[in-house]
């Protein structure tokens, strides 16, 4: 029941999930910091992904490659030449826009006016000429012919369209000067896996098919980045490259697409908010033979959260060409040599966190009041159990503290004694805490507490000895 990201943005700020970076200086556009609750949520998602890859597959191993890489890597990968967005400036306001996004907005306007034929035609043109594939002239003509205006100023005084490389460049080493020392911040984590493919093969006793997983930061100088953590300039990716024998790639691609969709469901994301969207062949990236997005229905529409790609032998072949090192695999059983194909699963951790927040967010009417609640899967919840003495009395505090210390061994818990019990419950609802435990005077008599469930607000009396079991069962749902 969300129609924009606004509520997520304000809840994130108010409750300490996500803050704008350098907030006290007015913020840095498209860069965000995770607060106490956000860092736990993000870490839980990451750990869940990591386990699903490495612990649950005996043929997937992890690496943690550096952010800085040899400049040749980005020549081999095609990023120096091709990782561009078509950018256009409004001469009057000096604001920058992505040319393809301007056209997308124009298409939407046409649709709003029921001019679907015109919109379809333009969409087709955009699909074949748009985004990172170049051919800016066509886009430029469309913008000029249609008199597309800047969305916020309404002005219409454009510069030429330029290809803008999204990689951040910096200088490497203390004596750096000039372009010779230029080095990039990695725009994706995948290349750190490809350049270590040989190292892993030689040390990890893996055989094809096998995978390498990695989580890490990536940087893209996005032209437009106004959608909270959906599109950032510094973000985190969770990628897995699965190396297979050519000929088995199509089956493996289908398997991974299915497996990844199941993972999203396992986070508790509602099925009606998830779908797969295969890329049409003429829109495939230069390296890909097949690709599909796993999309989520964000308040800003259906958008990609994860990409599954059949990258063929493009990357390994290019690295073999640029480095001069052999990337072939000798298959002992079949006694033959080949360059493996790669099936890639690539998901943005921040975008995934945003998906989880959007899917969990609910506003419910309770006794004429609105309750805001995050119905997070218990395994993702930043805090698992809130523990409250009903009032600030030493007898109650002592029992509550004891329960806190016991549960702390297994869970992230929070002790809270301030404010009315109702307010304390609501605070934990907004934080997504699945269980709250209240210690009252009756319980002192018979060694019981009240456990209150976030989702249905039901309360149950349980014996303190059984509390651990009840929470353990609840965590599985
Ligand atoms: P988009 O079309 O949205 O720019 P992409 O197709 O370039 O994305 P990939 O290069 O396939 O994205 O990256 C894989 C995943 O990394 C995406 O599905 C997304 O979750 C995440 N991602 C990519 N760019 C960003 C960004 N600027 N901010 C946050 N997450 C991102």
Image (cartoon, rainbow, N blue to C red):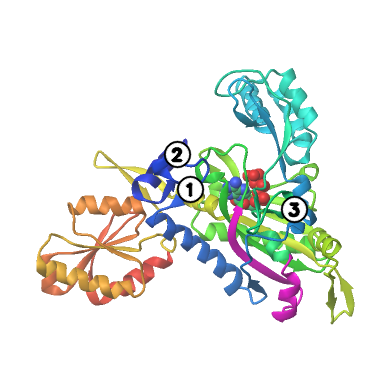
Disc 2 target residue:
2
Q: Residue 32 carries which label?
A: 1
Residue 430, horizontal then vertical, whole percent: 34, 50
471 left or right of 465 in image? right
293 left or right of 325 in image? left
Residue 246: say if magenta. no
Q: Can you name the residue that lies furthest to the right here?
A: 336
Circle 1/circle 3 CB separation < 8 Å: no
The reply to whether the residue tagged 1 has its Cβ within 8 angstroms of ligand 1 is no
Q: Which mark is residue 180?
A: 3
The mark that comes first in sequence, 1 or 3, is 1
Q: Is residue 149 above or below residue 188?
A: above
What's the CA distance linking mark 3 and mark 2? 50 Å
For the record, the magenta segment spans 195-218
Q: Is residue 312 above or below residue 64?
A: above
Disc 1 on helix, strand or loop? strand
> Closer to us: mark 3 or mark 2?
3
Disc 2 on helix, strand or loop? loop
């Amino acid at each position: 029941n969300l129609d924009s990201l606004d509520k997520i943005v304000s809840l994130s700020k108010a409750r300490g999930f996500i803050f704008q970076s350098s907030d006290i200086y007015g913020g840095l556009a498209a860069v965000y910091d995770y607060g106490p609750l956000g860092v736990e949520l993000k870490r839980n998602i990451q750990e869940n992904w990591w386990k699903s890859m490495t612990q649950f597959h005996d043929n997937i191993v992890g690496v943690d490659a550096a952010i800085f890489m040899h400049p040749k890597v980005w020549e081999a990968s095609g990023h120096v030449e091709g990782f561009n967005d078509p950018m256009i400036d409004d001469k009057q306001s000096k604001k920058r826009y992505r040319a393809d996004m301007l056209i997308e907005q124009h298409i939407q306007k046409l649709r709003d006016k029921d001019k679907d034929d015109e919109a379809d035609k333009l969409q087709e043109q955009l699909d074949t000429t748009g985004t990172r594939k170049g051919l800016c002239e066509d886009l430029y003509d469309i913008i000029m012919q249609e008199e597309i205006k800047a969305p916020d100023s309404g002005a219409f005084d454009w510069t030429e369209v330029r290809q803008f490389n999204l990689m951040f460049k910096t200088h490497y080493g203390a004596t750096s000067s000039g372009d010779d020392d230029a080095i990039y911040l990695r725009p994706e984590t995948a290349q750190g896996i490809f350049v270590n493919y040989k190292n892993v093969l030689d040390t990890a006793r893996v055989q094809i098919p096998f995978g390498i997983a990695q989580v890490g930061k990536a940087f893209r100088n996005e032209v437009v980045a106004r959608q909270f953590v959906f599109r950032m300039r510094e973000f985190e990716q969770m990628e897995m490259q699965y190396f297979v024998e050519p000929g088995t790639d199509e089956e493996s691609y289908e398997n991974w697409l299915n497996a990844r969709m199941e993972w999203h469901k396992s986070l508790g994301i509602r099925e009606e908010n998830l779908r797969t969207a295969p890329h049409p062949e003429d829109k495939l990236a230069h390296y890909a033979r097949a690709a599909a997005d796993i999309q989520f229905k964000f308040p800003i529409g259906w958008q990609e959260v994860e990409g599954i790609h059949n990258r063929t032998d493009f990357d390994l072949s290019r690295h073999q060409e640029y480095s001069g090192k052999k990337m072939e695999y000798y298959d002992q059983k079949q006694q033959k040599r080949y360059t493996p194909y790669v099936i890639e699963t690539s998901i943005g951790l921040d975008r995934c966190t945003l998906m989880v927040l959007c899917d969990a967010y609910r506003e419910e009417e309770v006794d004429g009041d609105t309750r805001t609640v995050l119905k997070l899967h218990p395994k993702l919840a930043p805090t698992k159990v809130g523990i409250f003495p009903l009032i600030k009395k030493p007898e109650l505090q002592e029992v509550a503290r004891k329960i806190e210390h016991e549960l702390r061994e297994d869970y992230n818990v929070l002790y809270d004694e301030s404010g009315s019990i109702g307010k304390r419950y609501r605070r934990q609802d907004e934080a997504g805490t699945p269980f709250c435990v209240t210690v009252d005077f009756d319980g002192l008599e018979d060694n019981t507490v009240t456990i209150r469930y976030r989702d249905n607000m039901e309360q149950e009396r349980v014996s303190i000895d059984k509390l651990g079991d009840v929470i353990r069962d609840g965590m599985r749902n």
